[in-house]
Image (cartoon, grey):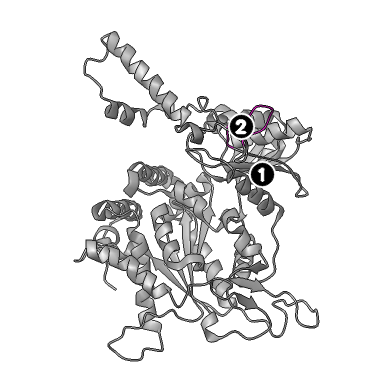
Amino acid sequence: MPKPQIHSTQAPHTGEYHELVFGFIAALGTDLDTLFHALEMELRSVGYKSHLIHVIESVPGYNDKVKSSDTMYEQMKQKIVLGTNFRQETKRSDIFAVIAVREIRRIRTQENKQIEDEKQKSVRPLQKVAYAIRQLKTPAEVAALRKTYGDGLYLISAYSSYDNRLRKIAQRLGGMINFPDHMDDAKKLIETDAKEEDKGEFGQQVSDTFPLADFFINMDKDSGTISNDIRKFVQLIFGVTITPTKEEFAMFHSFASALRSASLSRQVGAAIGTSEGDILAVGANEVPKPGGGLYWEDDIGKERDYERGYDTSQRSREEIFSDIVEKLQEKGLISQPVGKDSLKAINAKSLLLNRIDLSRTVHAEMAALLSAARLGVKIDGGTLYSTTFPCHDCSKHIVAAGITDVVYIEPYAKSLVSEFYPDSIAIEEREDTAVLSKKVTFRPFIGISPSRYVSFFLMKHPLSIIKRDDDQGNAITPRSGSWEWKPRFGVDPVTSEDKENLLIATFAETFPNSQVPSQ
């Protein structure tokens, strides 16, 4: 194991000012310009230079198809389509990861001051330099960059409500005065952007990529709040002692609870907390056991879906759909035979997918509510934190239980909450309006992702130990005279070049000509 880096009052070696790689994830219309400028300013304050990388601009044909478009509407539309087409043409859902890496290589080659001879193109990591990739659209891109840069990659998912995104797009199309005339075109662009998610492996997958971030920020807030949130994130990266907020603490409990689930489809966790940060109950999506509660790994005779060997929900939906088709054939309403593969393909796109009542598992939110009831814990007025947006079935029980707020990370397309409960649940509604109407507010989580919670808040991390006081017992803070701004986790200067070469080589072998932009 590498020797841990110790943050102390001693000046670091020059190699400790590691490169940092940031990636932005957001839905169309989110103000990423403001996000980058806030990040750039905070990085500059700690001595780091920032480079913004627009990956879409490196796609072959960008100038012809985007820049040559007559209107802003066509430019924005072509950007959306161009990205998906490029992934389809290259048959790689992570193609934009290699574009980002090659662009980082190009910047390094231009800026590196330590080139020893002209035959060796210096691609060694620079000092006090950060790269911001705008933007990532698929989990495959995230996975490729994680493998390449490890903990030196920092992903920021930027949230903005539908109404705010719609207005911002319309303003780009028509300006601050005439934007109302462009609302229909703005809606079309958002719909086009969303439809790209229906194009399978090579389409945009923002909803699946969004929850993979290390930090979540609300871009609908005022500029001061956005700057403060980015400042906190940057200071954590550089080892400043900052402890979790109540919401970060509660969401971490939700995340930890999710890890106990052996569900074959997804792991979901939930926690119920008070306004003072106390955790009242937790739950996970798991099969219930006799006597109350859910199965644990060390329970004797446990019979989860994993032990059974199949997903009961999936199998039940397929049986229902097959039965419907069979009945229609018996009545002569379907004349052509339907094979098993065709049945599965049609079923995968049918409304039967929204049937969530056929599963043996207790949903995480319900498990948390039931746990509180079983233990006699009062939860009315509490906040429920879930790793995934609650389904419409859990939501009615959340409302009935007296929960006032729900905080979530991952979207859930099957949920019909907005359609079923507009009278009792507020989604993307102004906070003051929701309070006046006494609705339960559903809002996105903002803060450090629970998946990086330990890395950011653990004082004695195996790879980076924070020394909080000096030999005299005085606190070491940014105000200390000997404080040095150096990141706890950055791009590994020893292994990063080899990993970059490996990523680039996989594409170069497949597309030896001009499919992949040159270095």
Q: State the residue at coordinates (32%, 15%).
A: 326
Q: In the image, is 101 to the left or to the right of 462?
A: left
Along the polypeptide, which appears first: circle 1 or circle 2?
2
Q: Quadrant of the C terminus?
A: bottom left
Quarter of the rendering containing residue 428: top right
Outermost residue, bottom side:
116
Q: State the residue at coordinates (73%, 34%).
A: 372
Query: Where in the figure is residue 489, as x and y percent of width and height?
Result: 55, 71
Disc 2 marks a residue whose amino acid type is Ser
In the image, the segment drawn in magenta is 285-295
Q: In the image, is 411 to the left or to the right of 257?
A: left
- The residue indicated by pointer 1 is 431
Query: Where in the figure is residue 187, as x and y percent of width and height?
Result: 42, 43
Query: Where in the figure is residue 145, as x and y percent of width and height?
Result: 42, 63
Helix, strand or loop status at disc 1: helix
Q: Is residue 419 visible?
A: yes
Q: State the residue at coordinates (66%, 85%).
A: 10
Helix, strand or loop status at disc 2: helix
Front residue of 24 and 69? 24
Q: Tell which tag, 1 or 2, sits nearer the viewer.
A: 2
Q: Is residue 451 magenta?
A: no
Quarter of the rendering containing residue 462: bottom right
Front residue of 363 and 299? 299
Report the magenta stretch's main SS. loop
- The residue indicated by pointer 2 is 395
Q: How many marks?
A: 2
Disc 1 marks a residue whose amino acid type is Glu
